Amino acid sequence: MAPMGIRLSPLGIAVFCLLGVGVIYHLYAGVLSSRFASFRQKSTVDLRDLLALSIEAAELGGREVKRIREDNTLEEKSKGKTKEGANDMLTMGDLNSHRKMFYLIKNTYPHIQVNSEEHDNAEGEATIWTRNIPKDILEKVSEGKEVSAERITVWIDPLDATQEYTENLRKYVTTMVCVAVDGDPVIGVIHKPFTGYTAWGFVGEGASVAPRASYNTNSPKVIVSRSHSGTVKKFAQTAFGNNTEIIPAGGAGYKVLALLDPKDEEHEKADIYIHVTFIKKWDICAGDAILKSVGGQMTTLKGDQINYSGSEGNTGGLLASIKTDHKSLVKRLPNLEEN
Ligand SMILES: Nc1ncnc2c1ncn2[C@@H]1O[C@H](COP(=O)(O)O)[C@@H](OP(=O)(O)O)[C@H]1O
Ligand SMILES: [Mg+2]
Ligand SMILES: [Mg+2]
Ligand SMILES: [Mg+2]
């Protein structure tokens, strides 16, 4: 009961209660938001969804790459030099593709780690995944695979073979997305913007691309970089003989496809892929995952698996092969430092 002489108005009680709620909200807002944040961190991602999204991202970025090449609005410049002194090129194709690819993935799954080769300070694009899962994925990957978000690292190369893109060597150009789980390459997508072809692989589940019927690894045709080659020609000839056929080509994505049987325009055919200079994880992760998904391998030149978490660089070189004894190939390679 109210003390004598004091009358409680309903409006006063309502204002008092609102103030109380405001004070409690203020006190607990920090606690609640950190609870929500930790809930988001703990959330899971379906890898089959992430494969479909990765394909959508690679194709969306690819449209920018193609448009800018056709409009001849590359505005090419150098980002600096690589460790070996080659020009590290950047064009509007790389940047626009990055904006499309990065924000499509980030807006759909804000809590997963996405590492892109390119960066920009502009406002992000407000795109989001259509949630469409292509029929061939539904056929090959029968059910969803939930993985907690903090185990995932996504690597994006918005335009691979930028050097060749500036030279209008269109066949070498790809866009790539890779999903690593606990550092292992699990999903790879390589898309060719100028033909519209897309190759994907999901380790343990299936792939859209197959190996060729056979490979010659006694005297292999070796595909290598044309613009970051270092000593690779001598290295391959020391390993496999002076008559070894060397195929210089642009793009790490292109060179992985040259080991397979892509149902695309005429593609060079190689037996193994060797790279001896420094290279970044967004260049190689998608190819590694696709090769693994069809029984191939990509390792350092010493035969070690590459971990796709943490830092962006790979210093041990690359050896990629398929349908062969990869370990015995490693044994035939000379020591990189001595070479
Ligand atoms: N020594 C090096 N240092 C940095 N990046 C390298 C490199 N060698 C190759 N790369 C990158 O790996 C990709 C394939 O190279 P290559 O065509 O020479 O085989 C290219 O990616 P980008 O075009 O995405 O930059 C290239 O820049
Ligand atoms: Mg680059
Ligand atoms: Mg690249
Ligand atoms: Mg690139």
Image (spheres, grey):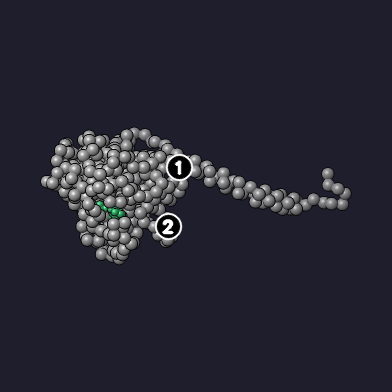
Task: Check disc 1 and give the amino acid type.
Answer: Glu
Residue placed under numbered mark 1 in the picture = 150
Which quarter shows the N terminus? top right
Residue 171 in the image: x percent, y percent? 21, 53
Residue placed under numbered mark 2 in the picture = 124
Residue 311 in the image: x percent, y percent? 39, 48
Point 42% across, 61% down: residue:
122
Residue 121 in the image: x percent, y percent? 42, 61
Q: What element does badge 1 sit on?
A: helix
Picture quarter containing residue 146? top left
Furthest toward the front, the residue is 338
Q: Is residue 337 visible?
A: yes
Picture quarter containing residue 73? bottom left
Residue 213, numbered label: none
Point 25% across, 47% down: residue:
338
In depth, the one of 208 and 233 nearer the eye is 233
CA distance for labels 2 and 1: 22 Å
Would residue 221 appear left or right of 127 to someone viewing this image?
left
Q: Nearer the viewer, mark 2 or mark 1?
A: 1
